[in-house]
Image (cartoon, helix red, strand yellow):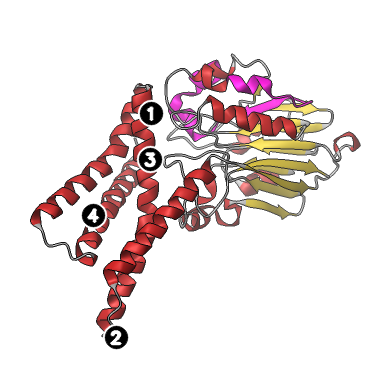
Amino acid sequence: MGIKMLLFLLLILASFFGAHFLLYFSLVKLFLIQSHTAKMILGTLLGMLAASFIVSSFVTHFIDTPASRAIYIASGTWVGLLINFLLAILLGWIVFHINRISGSSLPVARLFALFLFLSACYAAYGTYNAFNPRIKNIGVTIKNLPENWKGKTIVQLSDVHLGHIYRKDFLEKVVSKVNALDPDMVVITGDLFDGMDGNLEHLTSPLSDLKPRHGTFFITGNHETYLGVKRTFETLGETPNIQILNDQTENIDGLQIVGLSFPERGEKKDTEKTFASMGNFQKGLPTILLYHAPSDIKAFKDLGVNLQLSGHTHKGQIFPLGYIAKMIYGKYYYGLSTEGDYSIYTTNGTGTWGPPMRTGNTPEIVRITLK
């Protein structure tokens, strides 16, 4: 592990435990908790909740049982709830300081309790939302698109995160929705898996029911590198109608599909070198690129990519984390952007990572009509 990655993880851990301490401090101060015993119980409970997600994430990577999954789901839900509680904390302290500065007598404890309740309701909606992806329809114009491809559709799935939370029944529902769209092609742009071990073939079996006319194509995302790319390919090898594009190009009736695998941890993708190594890639043909992250935009433009399909960002997944995703990826963090002959669509994904919760955005199955 590089020093930058280590520092990043330490920052995440510090922020995570700091958020729990902030919640503890705010509950004590805004609810005027005086009892030493009550403070001890509250502190112990929040400490256990803070540790639960870290411990369960580690354990469930190696142990896949109903009990381990239940603990992971519960601890992940708590993390999502905590993020929503931070908004309630902010509002609670605003009311507290309004009283202190203006001398007014707003009922701080009651309002803080209301804010916590409303944020819990918002989190409950987010949990429901996370398991009900909607269809997103977009149209994209591709230069020199063959006549036989005009009006045809590609369905994009990304960031499904099959594992301890999203199981076979969820994928069955997704596959049913995809088939109802009658697509010409299906592409899966990474993070199909959540990075867990266990019986993955059982989880992916519904993919055999996908019925696109021109095939289903898969590329790896960062979570496949956690699971192990070899294990990923072995698992999907049991699904014969899934075609893996591992830095490879396929020409389908005049439309060039390029699939780039996500770089292994600690490595950087040399996109120009990778394209040059593909013997059958032809610059100038109408080209759709599958790449998990919305990055390397300039290089892909220069290589003649007409449409890049990406995911990875989840659009932040939980409000207000979308602002952080936008700071990192700019305007490419979500949605369709077109610049000359180049377009990119970044989906916010079909599943979730960590907290089984989506607030501020809706998971999606993307239907792309080619023009």
Q: Earlier in the sequence, mark 1 or mark 3?
A: 1
Quadrant of the drawing holding the N terminus: top left
Q: Is residue 57 left or right of residue 223?
A: left
Q: Residue at position x 26%, y 85% from top? A: 103
Q: Is residue 35 left or right of residue 301?
A: left
Measure how far apart labels 1 and 3 are at the Cα level.
10 Å
Badge number at residue 102: 2
User: Mark 3 is on which residue type?
Assistant: Gly
Camera-nearest label, 4 or 1? 1
Q: Is residue 366 left or right of residue 295?
A: right
User: Mark 4 is on which residue type?
Assistant: Phe
Mark 4 is surrounded, within 10 Å at the Cα level, by few (under 14), some (14 to 19) or many (20 or more) other residues, namely some
Q: Earlier in the sequence, mark 1 or mark 2?
A: 1
Badge number at residue 69: 1
| Residue 248 drawn at (x, y percent) | 66, 26
Badge number at residue 76: 3
**Which residue reaches farthest right?**
147
The stretch in magenta equals: 205-234
